[in-house]
Image (cartoon, helix red, strand yellow):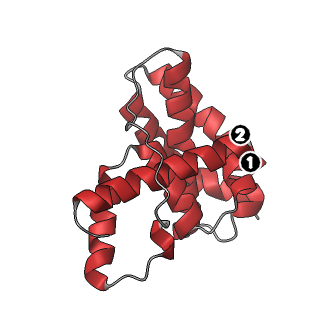
Amino acid sequence: MTNKAEKIWIEYSRLMLYIARGFFSDEQTAQDAVSEAIIRIIENIDRFEEIPSPLAKGLVIIITKNICRDKMKKADLPTTELGEEADLSPSPEALVISEETVAGIMACMAKLPEQYADILRLKIVYHLDDHRIAKVLAIKPQNARTRLSRARAALMKLMKEENLV
Protein backbone atom coordinates (compact mmCIF):
# COMPACT_ATOMS: atom_id res chain seq x y z
CA MET A 1 0.00 0.00 0.00
CA THR A 2 1.44 3.34 -1.02
CA ASN A 3 0.91 6.53 0.92
CA LYS A 4 -0.43 9.82 -0.49
CA ALA A 5 3.00 11.30 -1.21
CA GLU A 6 4.03 8.20 -3.17
CA LYS A 7 0.76 8.22 -5.10
CA ILE A 8 1.26 11.90 -5.96
CA TRP A 9 4.83 11.21 -7.09
CA ILE A 10 3.80 8.23 -9.21
CA GLU A 11 0.86 10.06 -10.77
CA TYR A 12 2.29 13.56 -11.26
CA SER A 13 6.12 13.52 -11.25
CA ARG A 14 6.35 13.59 -15.06
CA LEU A 15 3.92 16.51 -15.20
CA MET A 16 5.92 18.37 -12.54
CA LEU A 17 9.16 17.88 -14.47
CA TYR A 18 7.47 18.95 -17.71
CA ILE A 19 6.33 22.19 -16.03
CA ALA A 20 9.76 22.84 -14.53
CA ARG A 21 11.49 22.24 -17.87
CA GLY A 22 9.23 24.93 -19.33
CA PHE A 23 10.75 27.40 -16.89
CA PHE A 24 14.39 26.26 -16.94
CA SER A 25 16.63 25.09 -19.75
CA ASP A 26 19.03 23.53 -17.24
CA GLU A 27 17.88 19.99 -16.36
CA GLN A 28 19.39 20.10 -12.87
CA THR A 29 17.56 23.33 -12.01
CA ALA A 30 14.30 21.83 -13.27
CA GLN A 31 14.84 18.72 -11.13
CA ASP A 32 15.68 20.91 -8.11
CA ALA A 33 12.42 22.79 -8.61
CA VAL A 34 10.48 19.51 -8.72
CA SER A 35 12.19 18.40 -5.50
CA GLU A 36 11.20 21.65 -3.79
CA ALA A 37 7.66 21.28 -5.13
CA ILE A 38 7.30 17.75 -3.74
CA ILE A 39 8.46 19.02 -0.33
CA ARG A 40 5.79 21.75 -0.47
CA ILE A 41 3.22 19.16 -1.52
CA ILE A 42 4.15 16.94 1.43
CA GLU A 43 3.77 19.96 3.73
CA ASN A 44 0.23 20.37 2.34
CA ILE A 45 -0.58 16.67 2.02
CA ASP A 46 -3.85 17.06 3.95
CA ARG A 47 -5.29 19.03 0.98
CA PHE A 48 -4.99 15.94 -1.22
CA GLU A 49 -7.97 13.66 -0.66
CA GLU A 50 -8.17 11.53 -3.80
CA ILE A 51 -5.28 10.78 -6.12
CA PRO A 52 -5.66 11.14 -9.03
CA SER A 53 -8.28 13.87 -9.04
CA PRO A 54 -8.77 17.28 -10.65
CA LEU A 55 -8.07 18.95 -7.27
CA ALA A 56 -4.83 17.01 -6.78
CA LYS A 57 -3.65 17.77 -10.31
CA GLY A 58 -4.54 21.46 -9.96
CA LEU A 59 -2.67 21.78 -6.67
CA VAL A 60 0.39 19.98 -8.08
CA ILE A 61 0.46 22.28 -11.10
CA ILE A 62 0.05 25.47 -9.06
CA ILE A 63 2.62 24.47 -6.45
CA THR A 64 5.16 23.46 -9.11
CA LYS A 65 4.70 26.68 -11.09
CA ASN A 66 4.95 28.75 -7.92
CA ILE A 67 8.23 27.06 -6.92
CA CYS A 68 9.61 27.68 -10.42
CA ARG A 69 8.62 31.35 -10.32
CA ASP A 70 10.25 31.71 -6.89
CA LYS A 71 13.46 30.15 -8.18
CA MET A 72 13.41 32.50 -11.17
CA LYS A 73 12.98 35.52 -8.89
CA LYS A 74 15.88 34.39 -6.70
CA ALA A 75 18.01 34.08 -9.84
CA ASP A 76 16.84 37.56 -10.98
CA LEU A 77 15.19 36.18 -14.10
CA PRO A 78 12.36 38.32 -15.53
CA THR A 79 8.75 37.73 -14.54
CA THR A 80 5.63 39.48 -15.77
CA GLU A 81 3.13 41.49 -13.75
CA LEU A 82 0.08 43.54 -14.68
CA GLY A 83 0.08 47.08 -13.40
CA GLU A 84 -1.91 47.09 -10.18
CA GLU A 85 -4.69 49.60 -9.64
CA ALA A 86 -7.06 49.77 -6.71
CA ASP A 87 -10.57 48.73 -7.74
CA LEU A 88 -13.42 48.63 -5.28
CA SER A 89 -15.81 46.85 -7.67
CA PRO A 90 -17.49 43.67 -6.47
CA SER A 91 -15.37 40.55 -6.77
CA PRO A 92 -15.96 38.39 -9.87
CA GLU A 93 -17.25 35.48 -7.79
CA ALA A 94 -19.91 37.75 -6.26
CA LEU A 95 -21.44 38.52 -9.65
CA VAL A 96 -24.51 36.67 -10.86
CA ILE A 97 -23.40 35.43 -14.23
CA SER A 98 -24.74 33.84 -17.39
CA GLU A 99 -23.14 31.09 -19.45
CA GLU A 100 -21.76 33.66 -21.90
CA THR A 101 -20.29 35.65 -19.05
CA VAL A 102 -18.60 32.53 -17.68
CA ALA A 103 -16.92 31.98 -21.04
CA GLY A 104 -15.85 35.64 -21.05
CA ILE A 105 -14.46 35.41 -17.53
CA MET A 106 -12.51 32.27 -18.42
CA ALA A 107 -11.06 34.05 -21.46
CA CYS A 108 -10.06 36.98 -19.24
CA MET A 109 -8.48 34.66 -16.67
CA ALA A 110 -6.41 33.10 -19.46
CA LYS A 111 -4.97 36.56 -20.14
CA LEU A 112 -3.88 37.10 -16.52
CA PRO A 113 -0.30 36.47 -15.37
CA GLU A 114 -0.08 32.90 -14.10
CA GLN A 115 0.39 33.84 -10.46
CA TYR A 116 -2.88 35.80 -10.54
CA ALA A 117 -4.77 33.06 -12.36
CA ASP A 118 -3.36 30.47 -9.95
CA ILE A 119 -4.41 32.31 -6.81
CA LEU A 120 -7.90 32.89 -8.23
CA ARG A 121 -8.18 29.17 -9.02
CA LEU A 122 -7.12 28.28 -5.47
CA LYS A 123 -9.76 30.62 -4.05
CA ILE A 124 -12.65 30.13 -6.48
CA VAL A 125 -12.25 26.63 -7.88
CA TYR A 126 -10.66 24.84 -4.93
CA HIS A 127 -12.34 26.96 -2.22
CA LEU A 128 -9.19 27.42 -0.14
CA ASP A 129 -9.14 30.07 2.57
CA ASP A 130 -6.43 32.75 2.70
CA HIS A 131 -4.32 30.88 5.27
CA ARG A 132 -4.35 27.66 3.23
CA ILE A 133 -3.52 29.61 0.04
CA ALA A 134 -0.61 31.24 1.88
CA LYS A 135 0.65 27.84 2.99
CA VAL A 136 0.34 26.31 -0.50
CA LEU A 137 2.17 29.28 -2.07
CA ALA A 138 4.67 29.59 0.81
CA ILE A 139 3.83 33.24 1.44
CA LYS A 140 2.45 35.12 4.43
CA PRO A 141 -1.35 35.26 4.79
CA GLN A 142 -1.29 39.04 4.33
CA ASN A 143 0.67 38.58 1.09
CA ALA A 144 -1.91 36.02 -0.06
CA ARG A 145 -4.72 38.49 0.64
CA THR A 146 -2.84 41.26 -1.19
CA ARG A 147 -2.09 39.04 -4.20
CA LEU A 148 -5.71 37.86 -4.26
CA SER A 149 -6.92 41.45 -4.17
CA ARG A 150 -4.58 42.40 -7.02
CA ALA A 151 -5.66 39.35 -9.00
CA ARG A 152 -9.31 40.28 -8.56
CA ALA A 153 -8.58 43.88 -9.59
CA ALA A 154 -6.67 42.72 -12.67
CA LEU A 155 -9.49 40.35 -13.60
CA MET A 156 -12.11 43.08 -13.11
CA LYS A 157 -10.06 45.43 -15.32
CA LEU A 158 -9.95 42.84 -18.10
CA MET A 159 -13.65 42.09 -17.64
CA LYS A 160 -14.47 45.81 -17.97
CA GLU A 161 -12.38 46.00 -21.14
CA GLU A 162 -14.41 43.08 -22.52
CA ASN A 163 -17.68 44.75 -21.40
CA LEU A 164 -18.51 41.85 -19.06
CA VAL A 165 -19.31 44.17 -16.14
Instruction: Indicate the quadrant containing the N terminus: top left, top right, bottom left or bottom right.
Output: bottom right
Q: Is residue 163 left or right of residue 33?
A: left
Which element is circle 2 on? helix
Residue type, numbered disc 2: Ile
**Quadrant where the image shows the C terminus:** bottom left
- Residue highlighted by disc 2: 39
Closest to the observer: 129 or 38? 129
Q: Is residue 70 visible to the viewer in this orientation of the structure?
A: yes
Residue at 54 percent across and 39 percent down: it is 66
Q: Residue 5: x and y, percent? A: 71, 53
The residue that disc 1 covers is 42
Position above or below: 126 against 155? below
Q: Quadrant of residue 139?
A: top right
The answer to the question of whether label 2 and label 1 lie on touching residues, with beta carbons closer than 8 A, is yes
Q: Could you tell me which secondary element the residue under label 1 belongs to?
A: helix
Q: Using the image, determine if residue 117 lies above or below residue 66.
A: below
Residue 121: percent from the left, percent from the top?
Answer: 50, 60
Q: Position of residue 113 (x, y in %)?
A: 38, 43
